Image: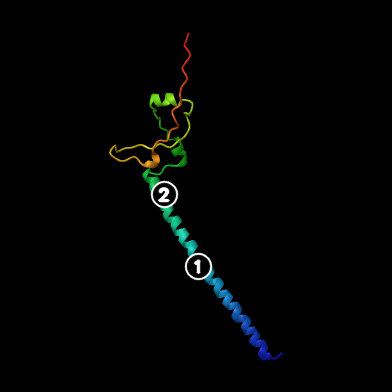
């Protein structure tokens, strides 16, 4: 094999290696840019959370769990569904603050049919 062919073969290999290296470098730079954007977002989010914390508007999960509210249920409704009502369990409540506002359809109560209550035996 002539020296010229060897040099030509080495040059082709070198060009191929450099091309692959350039592609990998481009991919690596894109990954670094993506991670920098994510880091910027995390820094901004941290700053927002710190502002909320200082202003007292941030509630931790533990504080949220401790925020309890007592709920009053209409006595006749409670009497009808007594077997179904569970007390002391966490739940979600929606409060209508503006009476003129329409109540959302997805929050319309969907109660089971009113159970018939057997007559109570005479006490005696």
**Tag 2 residue:** 49
Q: Is residue 5 left or right of residue 25?
A: right
**Tag 1 residue:** 30
Q: Is residue 104 left or right of residue 90?
A: left
Q: Residue at x 29, y 37 (%)?
A: 99
Q: Is residue 120 left or right of residue 21?
A: left
Q: Is residue 11 above or below residue 95?
A: below
Label 1 crowd (10 A; few <14 / some 14-19 / many >=20): few
Q: Earlier in the sequence, mark 1 or mark 2?
A: 1
- In this rendering, the label closer to the viewer, 1 or 2: 1
Query: Who is closer to the viewer here, 36 or 90?
Result: 90
Q: Residue at x 40, y 45 (%)?
A: 53
Residue extending furthest toward the top:
124
The location of residue 119, given as percent across then percent down, is: 46, 17
Query: Who is closer to the viewer here, 116 or 49?
Result: 116
Q: Is residue 71 above or below residue 122?
A: below
Query: Who is closer to the viewer here, 105 or 11?
Result: 105
The location of residue 123, given as percent across then percent down, is: 47, 10
Q: Residue at x 44, y 59 (%)?
A: 40
Q: Quadrant of residue 6?
A: bottom right
The location of residue 5, given as percent across then percent down, is: 67, 89
**Quarter of the image that includes the N terminus:** bottom right
Q: Residue at x 42, y 42 (%)?
A: 59
Element carrying mark 1: helix
Q: Is residue 1 left or right of residue 33?
A: right
Q: Quadrant of residue 69?
A: top left
Label 2 crowd (10 A; few <14 / some 14-19 / many >=20): some
Checking the image for residue 76, the label placed there is none
Residue extending furthest toward the left:
100
């Amino acid at each position: 094999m002539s020296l010229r062919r060897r040099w030509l073969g080495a040059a082709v290999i070198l060009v191929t290696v450099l091309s692959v290296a350039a592609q990998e470098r481009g991919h690596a730079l894109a990954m670094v840019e993506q991670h920098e954007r994510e880091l910027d977002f995390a820094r901004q989010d941290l700053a927002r959370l710190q502002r909320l914390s200082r202003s007292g508007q941030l509630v931790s999960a533990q504080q949220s769990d401790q925020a309890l509210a007592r709920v009053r249920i209409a006595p006749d409704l409670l009497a009808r569904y007594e077997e179904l009502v569970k007390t002391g369990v966490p739940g979600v409540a929606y409060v209508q603050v503006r009476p003129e506002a329409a109540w959302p359809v997805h929050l319309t109560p969907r109660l089971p049919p009113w159970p018939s209550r057997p007559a109570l035996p005479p006490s005696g």
